């Protein structure tokens, strides 16, 4: 399983690198990043689209036609549309989220930014996000781009991941720690 994951990660890196270089040559890095964000949002909202991207039953030609029509309708730029066409031809549409992440990582590196993944128990208010961004920027020593998500299973608090470092300030984690302490007493 790890070999499959590593192979798909390599595929995503190669496609992201090619897309990144083309976008840089054309001065379209921000436009491509916005298109990829929009595409990922569409994938998150539509289970049918996700099934289309990963279905082995749908032929390559049908996938290509469908994904290009979708890209046109969504107003995605030429570079992303062409990339989707190539991905469909090579049965690599399922790699789109990994390609988008790799593209954003390359863009952040170019800009001297670091990406912080924030998982909160509930949506964070704008002022809380701003404070968190400032704290993470001071910790990282450079500009920060936040990627936020919500996981109600945390109960309260947040989990912040910057590179390989993680700070778990969630109520779930504190309860787990308390449980371990109580097991030691009994």
Image (spheres, rainbow, N blue to C red):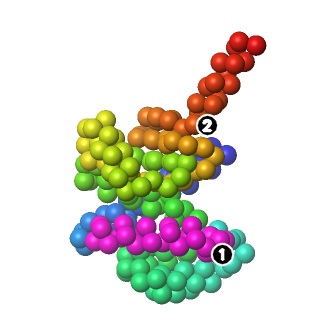
Q: Which residues are magenta?
A: 28-52
User: Is 75 drawn above or below residue 170 in the view shown?
Assistant: below
User: Is 28 drawn above or below residue 103 in the view shown?
Assistant: below
Q: Nearer the viewer, mark 1 or mark 2?
A: 2
Mark 1: which secondary structure? helix
The reply to whether residue 87 is visible in this rendering is no
Image quadrant where one finds the C terminus = top right
Image x and y of residue 62, in percent: 62, 84
The reply to whether residue 4 is visible in this rendering is yes
User: Is 33 drawn above or below residue 120 in the view shown?
Assistant: below
| Mark 1 vs mark 2, CA separation in Å | 33 Å
Q: Residue at x 61, y 73 (%)?
A: 46
Mark 2: which secondary structure? helix
Q: Residue at x 46, y 83 (%)?
A: 74
- Magenta stretch prevailing secondary structure: helix
> On the image, numbered disc 1 is attached to which residue?
48
Residue 153 is left or right of residue 126, and the answer is: right
Residue 3 lies in the magenta stretch: no
Image x and y of residue 115, in percent: 37, 48
């Amino acid at each position: 399983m790890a070999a499959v994951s590593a192979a798909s990660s390599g595929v995503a890196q190669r496609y992201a690198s090619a897309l990144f270089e083309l976008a840089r040559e054309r001065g379209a890095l921000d436009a491509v990043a916005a298109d990829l964000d929009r595409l990922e949002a569409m994938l998150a909202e539509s289970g049918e689209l996700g099934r289309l991207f990963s279905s082995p039953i749908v032929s390559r030609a049908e996938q290509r036609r469908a994904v290009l029509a979708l890209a046109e309708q969504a107003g995605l730029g030429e570079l992303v549309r062409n990339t989707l066409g190539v991905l469909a031809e090579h049965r690599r549409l399922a790699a789109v989220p990994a390609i988008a992440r790799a593209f954003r990582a390359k863009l952040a590196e170019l800009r001297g930014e670091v990406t912080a993944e924030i998982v909160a128990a509930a949506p964070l208010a704008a002022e809380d996000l701003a404070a968190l961004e400032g704290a993470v920027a001071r910790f990282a020593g450079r500009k920060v781009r936040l990627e936020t998500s919500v996981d109600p299973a945390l109960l309260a608090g947040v989990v912040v991941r910057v590179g390989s470092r993680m700070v778990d300030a969630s109520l779930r984690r504190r309860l787990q720690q308390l449980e371990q302490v109580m097991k030691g007493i009994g």
